[in-house]
Amino acid sequence: MIVKLLQLYVFFLAFSSLAQQVLINGKVVDSLGIIKNANIINLKTNQGTFSSDEGDFRIYVSEGDSLRISSIQYVTRKFYVTKQNINNKSIIIKLKPSTYVLDEFELKKHNLTGRLGIDLKEVPTDIRDSLLRNVMDFSNVNLKRAEEDDYIDKRVRPQKVETDPTQMFGGVGTKIRIPFKNKESILRKELNRKKAVPDKILSELGEQFFFQELTIPKDNYFHFLDYCNSMGIEKLYNEGEILELIKIFQKESVPYLQIIKKE
């Protein structure tokens, strides 16, 4: 008899608890706008739901319940339901973006001094040149063969253009053709220009960072930098934003390795 009374009492409490629950509407936002696909769980009832593409959700709650709201790239938050929330039947929950802390790393490698002009010379040239071997190969180009348009007659001076400065639009449409003197030197300058920034980045961050920590294959180093080029890495390097560069490399190395693995 006592057992039956206890069962009835427990059932009555559970029924009373469910009767007090109300369905409320909510919205998950951040400082810029809505957050979709956020996970909302009532920790008391273990019932959960997700926010829609407009950031909206609906869930049963009682006064005093605690909701846990979580989403990727945001700090997980607990929200306690108040009597005012019950009466209004609506809540707005604001999340804060997560702050990522970079792992400790060492900038100086191979006893570098920290001065780019000196440290660049300390990086073994065989490693730097081998990294470019599969990216820039001019072995099939005959740079010594003279092209017809490359011939320069030193006796003929370039055309001199004289315009009247008082005449509106004077000289518009006039062209001066200056032939190339040395195609080989132009290609060499272009190659050196393309190598300069990647070599400096490799010298400053070190081979261990790229080839061991990020596990980028050595032959893919320049291809990886080209993959990250849309993120403005050259501008960031020139402005001295080294930590921002490292964040980009750490983040982009994950999808890059997946791509080259599929290939």
Image (cartoon, rainbow, N blue to C red):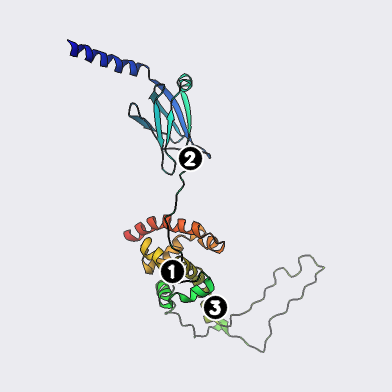
Query: Which residue, given by chain and number where applicable, does mark 2 sit on?
Result: 96
* Residue 181 relative to residue 83: left or right: right
Q: Amino acid at mark 1?
A: Lys
Q: CA distance from mark 2 to mark 3?
A: 52 Å
| Camera-side mark, 1 or 3 | 1
193 or 3, which is in the foreground?
A: 3
Query: Which residue, given by chain and number where applicable, does mark 1 sit on?
Result: 109
Which class describes the residues within 10 Å of circle 1: few (<14), some (14-19), or many (20+)?
A: some
Is disc 3 placed on a helix, strand or loop? helix
| Camera-side mark, 2 or 3 | 2
Residue 58 found in image quarter: top left
Q: Mark 1 vs mark 3: which is more N-terminal?
A: 1
Q: Position of residue 74 (x, y in %)?
A: 44, 41
Q: Mark 1 vs mark 2: which is more N-terminal?
A: 2
Q: Residue furthest top?
A: 1
| Camera-side mark, 1 or 2 | 1
User: Quick check: 142 above or below 241?
Assistant: below
Is disc 2 placed on a helix, strand or loop? loop
* Residue drawn at x 33%, y 15% as measured from the top left: 16
Q: Amino acid at mark 2?
A: Lys
User: Quick check: 193 above or below 99?
Assistant: below
Query: Which residue, given by chain and number where applicable, does mark 3 sit on?
Result: 186
Q: Position of residue 120 (x, y in %)?
A: 49, 73
